[in-house]
Image: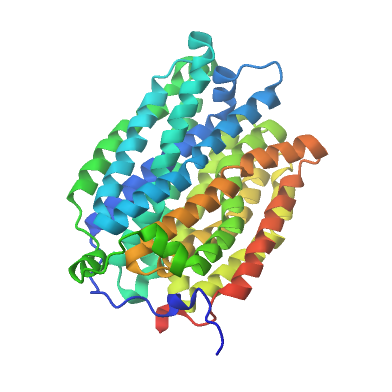
Amino acid sequence: MSQSSPLDAVSSPPAAAHVGLSRRSVVAAGTGNALEFYDFAIFASLTPVISQLFFPSGDPLAAILSTLALYAVGFVMRPVGAIVFGRLADRHGRRIPLAISVLIMGVTTVLIGVMPTYAQAGVLAPLLLCVARLLQGLSVGGEFGTSASFLVEHAPRQRRGLYGSFAFFSSTAGSVLGALVVLVLTIWMPAEALNGWGWRIPFLLGFPLLAIGLYLRYRIAESPEFEAVKAENARARSPLRTLFREHWQAFLTLIGICIGFSVASATAQAFVLTYIRSVVGLPAVQALTSVVLATTFGVFMVLVFGHLSDRYGRRAVLLFACVLTVVLPYPSMLVMGSAGFGSALLGQLILWVPVAAFGGAIPALFAELFPTKVRASGFGIGYGFGSAIFAGTAPFVATLLIELTGDTLSPAWYMTAAGLVTLVVVLTSVSVRRSSVS
């Protein structure tokens, strides 16, 4: 008897009641995701400013590396958050962890906005910033897997790819909003004011998102698939033990897919701005404008690929994403490095195609990997570990590669290597059968 693929479950999603995804459910899940990644976007967009305010150094590159390391710290707690919130979601429902995660992220984002700088508090300032980033990582760790599972569980069977893609769509939209806010402030404020106090404004603007997100998530209905499991008394007593005893192959497959996706998406969303400002030398306004335009393009491409994954299957879209992650990083960075706004924008647009393809297919695929009783844990913990190891470190590794090799295109080879690993995983582990038509 042949051994089944760990992704064969994708071809036969659980037979739960099909309830149309309500507008409130989409907005509630999306607002929280947007808040989570709004902060990560403004932190990445303000890296040159934050590096000087919290890590003063005679070497600008050393200050930037310190800030990017702190960016990575935000990912360290993701697996912990996924374990804590995943168990809560699988035992007691999706609504509670969704509300708690948005509360933690919103409060810590606002706290960063009132935090003292190194000049005001000395070494205490970067320590407080580190604690805030750890709490935000805890929040994000419990957010994405639970919200994506929530969306997929509300979706009609034939449209899980599209509705699942709203998880990455909304998070990327939050990134666009964050970059747009920083862009407006950069245009509107003198550099001295932005570096002195204006950098706090984007963090403080997280409060309205917190209030809206918390209100909406408090009012949403529970996932129908979880309610069915609860009614049948089929919840796992220990979701973590069940996950690693019965679904470890799917868990490893998920992490393998995360490698290429995490490196490519973190490069596009967190590293590129620093690269085109510090390495290419593009002025701040032009650099931010190019990032906003490219990310906006990526936002809507995510939904396109989510729809295509329903029509042609998750595997086909994933293979497309992997191949492009292998072949496009070098030409995209080559174009990006050619001086000029148009080149920077075009290079980012090229890079966003495989990122959007991944983002459109993986939310539904990762949710379908696991049965409802361990879905939030399996999705969240696997994605948490994958993003912590590969996404959180990608900007730091990319900057370090440039420093060590002297080659400004060296980050492209890192993305290519990650894409190759994920390509092998998809070819060997993902079922050929199309999930959406079985």
Asked which quadrant contains residue 276, the reply is top right
Indicate the quadrant containing the N terminus: top left, top right, bottom left or bottom right: bottom right
Of 36 and 185, nearer the camera is 36
Q: Is residue 171 left or right of residue 343?
A: left
Q: Position of residue 426 (x, y in %)?
A: 59, 70
Of 321 and 240, nearer the camera is 240
Position of residue 263 relative to residue 190, above or below, is below
Q: Name the outermost residue toward the top.
A: 120
Position of residue 150 relative to residue 344, above or below, is below
Which residue is at a point 51% across and 54% down the rendered structure image? Answer: 298
Which residue is at a point 17% across and 50% down the rendered structure image? Answer: 219
Indicate the quadrant containing the C terminus: top left, top right, bottom left or bottom right: bottom left
Q: How many numbered dots are placed on residues in this image?
A: 0
Q: Name the outermost residue toward the right.
A: 406
Of 171 and 286, nearer the camera is 171
Q: Is residue 188 left or right of residue 350?
A: left
Q: Is residue 63 left or right of residue 15?
A: right
Q: Is residue 188 visible?
A: no
Q: Position of residue 27 (x, y in %)?
A: 28, 52
Q: Position of residue 162 (x, y in %)?
A: 39, 66
Of 226 and 11, nearer the camera is 226
Which residue is at a point 49% across and 16% down the rendered structure image? Answer: 124
Which residue is at a point 47% across and 38% down the rendered structure image? Answer: 40
Q: Position of residue 224 (x, y in %)?
A: 23, 66
Colour setting = rainbow
Q: Is residue 71 visible?
A: yes
